Image: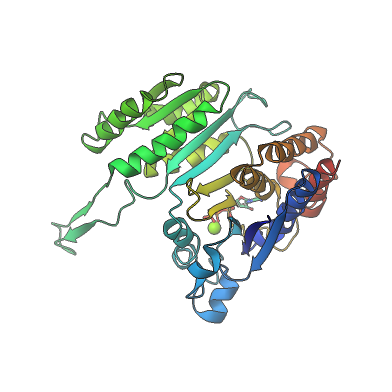
Amino acid sequence: MAHTIAVIAGDGIGTEVMPEGIRALEAAAKRFNIDLEFSVFEFGSCDYYLEHGKMLPDDWFEQLKDFDALFYGAVGWPEKVPDHISLWGSLLQFRRQFDQYINLRPCKLMPGIKSPLAGREAGDIDFYVVRENTEGEYSSVGGKMFEGTDREVVIQETIMTRTGVDRVLKYAFELAQTRPRKKLTSATKSNGISITMPYWDERVVEMSKGYPEIAVDKFHIDILTANFVLHPDWFDVVVGSNLFGDILSDLGPACTGTIGIAPSANINPEGKFPSLFEPVHGSAPDIAGKGVANPIGQIWSGAMMLEHLGYKEAADAIVTAIEEVLSEGDSQVLTRDVGGQGTTASLGRAIADKLAV
Ligand code: ATP
Ligand code: MG
């Protein structure tokens, strides 16, 4: 049976890298005999907003809920629509309504890519950041008192539920189990945040009892960020609350070079709702329309989507194709951000060609 994929390219370079993402997926699908069916949607973009006064149609949930996955480009065009409208009106709706409680980002230094960390080469950095994506510090619970006076007080609560914490930890432990090093690092701050973070630590200890083969450690978020920079080779799977995961999931990919390469997934692991796969980068208005955006973030996100759908071999083949093209280092093929003079299409085609064996 065909796997149905809803395609939302969004704005700016999202519309340029998306065709290359699909090109690679089609090449992998052909080689591994996978039946993928793409349906393209115009909503979820600022152009749609300008025409309709909203980012999504009222029945978007109905339209999308039965797809096997969502393949997203990038959203946002601050000159036309403020970011809080475009982002809240689309991507964040999907994450929430489809209960995509895992945000997953691989942080892998690829061959030929210069890490901002001196002396690091491909193979030195290869870990995942797993972020809790629905609760924690990003609650809207709180309030203001004495507003406008010099006695102003503002409060915002952190919410952790047993279900919410356990499900992200379970996902992270299961992921660690599939990795050769079988190591899990928990991000905490239980020395300063005295109620929620000790609870998080307790749940990690409790969960670890079910995974005796996983080596578990924890770091306070301050020293953990330092160690991302100083010792990225220590990490295998790193799990954090919504806020800590947010910080780490930008820092991790930043340690592995250009933002144009990093992929991400917003996952509903049970498959009750579709999961969403998108590059880490945004719509990049500064380079949009020039055909020079790096399509690897989109293509790699497609690989994560295939893995999620159960096609690990095909997913690995896409990542290998990316690695091969980057290792070859042909400046006519590579985009500017990775030192070439090529285009979105030249890099996308080169990767698809590697897949078409
Ligand atoms: P967000 O939309 O998440 O708020 P942003 O708008 O701040 O992010 P991006 O749109 O990701 O940031 O762009 C940040 C910088 O990285 C820009 O200078 C942009 O040109 C560059 N960049 C982003 N994506 C790519 C890409 N795929 N290829 C090359 N350069 C990129
Ligand atoms: Mg942006």
Q: Residue furthest front?
A: 1
Note whether 126 is above or below 84 in the view shown: above
Residue 265 visible at all: yes
Q: Position of residue 312 (x, y in %)?
A: 66, 38
Q: Position of residue 263 (x, y in %)?
A: 60, 45
Quadrant assignment, res 165: top left
Q: Position of residue 167 (x, y in %)?
A: 39, 40
Report the residue at 65% width, 45% height from top. Answer: 306
Report whether 197 appears left or right of 259: left
Tally of numbered discs = 0
Q: Quadrant of ligand 2?
A: bottom right
Quadrant assignment, res 246: top left
Report the residue at 44% width, 41% height from top. Answer: 131
Report the residue at 68% width, 40% height from top. Answer: 315
Note whether 19 is above or below 179 in the view shown: below
Q: Position of residue 207 (x, y in %)?
A: 35, 29
Report the residue at 61% width, 25% height from top. Answer: 118
Residue 341 visible at all: no
Between 46 and 132, the one lying in front of the other is 132
Q: Quadrant of the N terminus?
A: bottom right
Report whether 313 appears left or right of 283: right
Note whether 261 is above or below 194 in the view shown: below
Note whether 256 is above or below 271 in the view shown: above
